[in-house]
Amino acid sequence: MDYRDIIKSPIVTEKSSDLAKQNVITFSVDVKANKTQIKKAVENIFNVKVDNVNTINVKPKKKRVGRYAGKTNRVKKAIVKLKEGSSIEL
């Protein structure tokens, strides 16, 4: 698996922007990726040192459009804490 397949996109919200001031960046990642793969991918793509990785699995929600019912896609989020002196500009 390529490193760019693991990291899909950064998540930019009010909460993640506040965390970015503390060297904590949030990414949307591949559902099958584990913490060590995420750490290696972030270090190789952005040339930074990663201190800690926390992951969250977001379950799909039920949605309806008229008589058609379905679910949203499941998502995995990674909250990556960078070491002192490392930073990422998004």
Image (cartoon, rainbow, N blue to C red):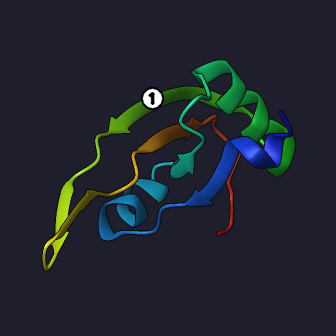
Query: Which corner quadrant of the image does residue 77 belong to?
Result: top left
Determine the residue positioned at 54% across, 39% down. 80
Where does the C terminus fall, quadrant-wise? Answer: bottom right
**Direction bottom: furthest residue:** 66
Q: Is residue 56 visible?
A: yes
Q: Secondary structure at mark 1?
A: strand
Q: Which residue is mark 1?
A: 54
Q: Is residue 64 left or right of residue 73?
A: left
Residue 11 in picture, x, y percent from top left: 48, 61
Where does the N terminus fall, quadrant-wise? Answer: top right
Residue 82 in picture, x, y percent from top left: 61, 39
Out of 70 and 90, give the one closest to the viewer. Answer: 70
Q: Amino acid at mark 1?
A: Asn
Out of 15 and 68, give the one closest to the viewer. Answer: 68
Determine the residue positioned at 80% across, 50% down. 46
Q: Residues within 10 Å of mark 1 (few under 14, many from 20)?
A: few
Query: Which corner quadrant of the image does residue 47 belong to?
Result: top right
Determine the residue positioned at 46% across, 50% down. 22
Q: Is residue 4 left or right of residue 50?
A: right
